[in-house]
């Protein structure tokens, strides 16, 4: 049992600051099972999650939406209870939030006193949205939820991102089994029963006109994109389409058949992959209110120059954020009444995950040199960082 | 522009859910999901409704009253798996906007049938797995606090 002598709340430290917590998504990392002399390790562990978060798309583009806090809570002992009933080492330690493995008889299910966590965090960071409890244990495990708990070892940061997908963004599991591929009792997970899931990233619907994520499916992509030929088992065959193709892949939401996921792979299916486009879109929409609004549009002249008589000339401008919605306009600045002087076309290069290069080719339609200026208007549909 | 929200803390045991506290906080809520067109859907959500029972705000949550838990993979090559929870109980938070005219919050959930006595692990898995995709129904409704109350 937790007692007042099991540790002490030391206070909160803001480790990512982007302004008032009244306007940001406030993520709180709490220590459990760290002794007073181990708090520097907790700071390092917390920072490692922050680094992983902001290295993961789409969070790479929305750091400014977050405030991140570390709540330092010391424990008398290090680690968490590890009962022998589940094959653990039998350790029973005095920690502030009473973290323990072996909940519901599951060795890896690590849970702490969520009410105590909520009370401590609410006192320190009243405007919290999501809490991650970092447990200083070499035994692997954890549990999800709005107050998610992770033993700090192995792939815990990657698992935490999956759990944030559930807790903060309402994303469903995209895997197509319950106890594991080949581990489910025969017939139990073959066909998804009727009932459209409410979550945005799984569906029973393969109608192009009405599927939830239809706006992200290319016209040339077949629906369903990948069917499972044997509903008695998972289909781990190769994808028939290139990586990143959005469609409808059969096998999702704990069933081999009848439910579909948007891409072949996604972090909500396997931790070794990025979020799929549909999950990223959901995250962006959820985080949009927490980002700064572009008051605008921004307008300006990006370049000026002269295009020789009858000739064409190309300019480019690079490293523009991909989240910006940009309109280009090229106008002649040399007066010549009576007929159009120029034509232009814009070509676009996705130069990186987050950046765009615009190529603008201007053709002089006249027998004289023409001076031009290229104007932009940035209309931001999403918040910006 | 910051706005006022209400942090609702619920507790649950089995299918029974209680509102433990409702606290106004100056912070931004997560945005609303669609407030129409979801009849018959499965899952879990909360609805903020006005005095005429119109839905003003709806937030879909991922299984805050879980009858199963996700067991984490130990490496990137391993799989997530699910396991039934013998006695579902716990608490969860929902942050809703403090909307003028809002009167109640409804809790909607897809829940499994009650466990029969001496259920096998295989039967429990099938029951819980199927239960989470039944059409959601309103399992509780609570009044929201008056403007200056708790």
Image (cartoon, grey):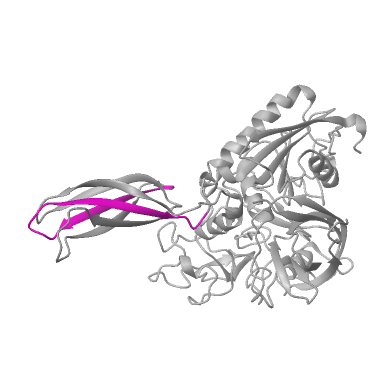
Decide if residue A121 is on the left or right side of residue A373: right
Task: Note whether A42 is above or below B147 in the view shown.
Answer: above
Secondary structure that dominates the magenta span: strand
Going by the image, does A41 lie left or right of A211?
right
Q: Nearer the viewer, residue A269 or B17?
A: B17
Q: Is residue B86 visible?
A: yes
Which residue shows up at 76% across the image and 41% down it? A125
* Quarter of the image where one finds residue B12: bottom right
Residue B39 position in % (x across, y down): 68, 78
Q: Residue at the location (67% across, 71% down)?
A: B35
Give how far across and how far down residue A316 sits, in percent: 27, 47
Which quarter of the image is occupied by the N terminus of chain A? top right
Count of number-bearing discs = 0
**Does residue B109 show up?**
no
**Whole-percent x, y for residue A98 in the image:** 85, 39
* Extent of the magenta region: A354-382
């Amino acid at each position: 049992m937790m007692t007042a002598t099991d540790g002490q709340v030391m206070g909160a430290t803001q480790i990512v600051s982007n302004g008032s917590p009244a306007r940001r998504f406030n993520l709180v990392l709490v220590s459990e099972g760290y002794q007073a002399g181990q708090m520097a390790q907790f700071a390092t562990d917390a920072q490692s999650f922050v680094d992983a978060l902001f290295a993961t798309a789409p969070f790479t583009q929305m750091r400014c939406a977050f405030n991140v806090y570390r709540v330092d809570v010391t424990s008398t002992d290090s680690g968490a209870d590890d009962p022998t009933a589940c094959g653990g080492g039998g350790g029973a330690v005095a920690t502030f939030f009473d973290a323990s493995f072996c909940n519901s008889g599951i060795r890896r299910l690590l849970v702490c006193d969520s009410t105590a966590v909520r009370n401590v965090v609410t006192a320190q960071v009243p405007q919290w949205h999501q809490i991650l409890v970092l447990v200083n244990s070499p035994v692997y495990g954890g549990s999800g939820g709005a107050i998610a708990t992770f033993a700090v070892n192995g792939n815990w940061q990657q698992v935490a991102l999956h759990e944030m997908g559930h807790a903060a963004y309402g994303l469903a599991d995209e895997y197509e089994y319950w106890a594991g591929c080949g581990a489910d009792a025969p017939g139990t997970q073959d066909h998804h029963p009727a009932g459209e899931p409410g979550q945005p990233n799984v569906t029973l619907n393969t109608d192009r006109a009405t599927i939830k994520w239809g706006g992200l499916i290319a016209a040339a992509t077949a629906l369903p994109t990948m069917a499972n030929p044997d509903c008695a088992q998972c289909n781990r065959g190769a994808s028939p389409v290139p990586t990143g193709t959005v469609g409808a892949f059969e096998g999702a939401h704990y069933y081999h058949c009848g439910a579909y996921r948007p891409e072949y792979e996604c972090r909500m299916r396997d931790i070794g992959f990025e979020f799929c486009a549909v999950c990223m879109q959901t995250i962006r929409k959820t985080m949009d209110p927490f980002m700064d609004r572009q008051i605008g549009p921004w307008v300006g002249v990006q370049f000026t120059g002269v295009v020789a008589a009858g000739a064409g000339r190309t300019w480019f401008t690079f490293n523009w954020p991909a989240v910006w919605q940009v309109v280009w306009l090229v106008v002649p600045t040399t007066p010549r009444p009576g007929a159009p002087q120029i034509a232009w076309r814009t070509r676009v290069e996705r130069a990186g995950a987050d950046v765009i290069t615009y190529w603008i080719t201007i053709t002089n339609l006249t027998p004289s040199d023409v001076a031009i200026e290229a104007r932009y208007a940035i209309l931001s549909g999403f918040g910006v960082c | 522009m910051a706005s006022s929200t209400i942090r609702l803390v619920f507790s649950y045991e089995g299918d029974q859910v209680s509102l433990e506290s409702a606290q106004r906080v100056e912070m931004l809520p997560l945005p609303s999901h669609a407030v129409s067109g979801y009849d018959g859907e499965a899952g879990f959500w909360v609805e903020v409704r006005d005095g005429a029972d119109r839905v003003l705000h709806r937030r879909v949550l991922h299984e805050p009253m879980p009858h199963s838990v996700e067991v984490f993979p130990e490496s990137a090559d391993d799989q997530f798996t699910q396991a039934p929870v013998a006695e579902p109980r716990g608490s969860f938070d929902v942050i809703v906007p403090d909307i003028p005219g809002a009167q109640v919050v409804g809790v909607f959930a897809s829940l499994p049938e009650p466990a029969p006595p001496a259920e096998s692990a295989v039967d429990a898995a099938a029951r819980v797995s199927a239960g989470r995709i039944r059409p959601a129904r309103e399992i509780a409704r609570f009044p929201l606090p008056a403007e200056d109350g708790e």
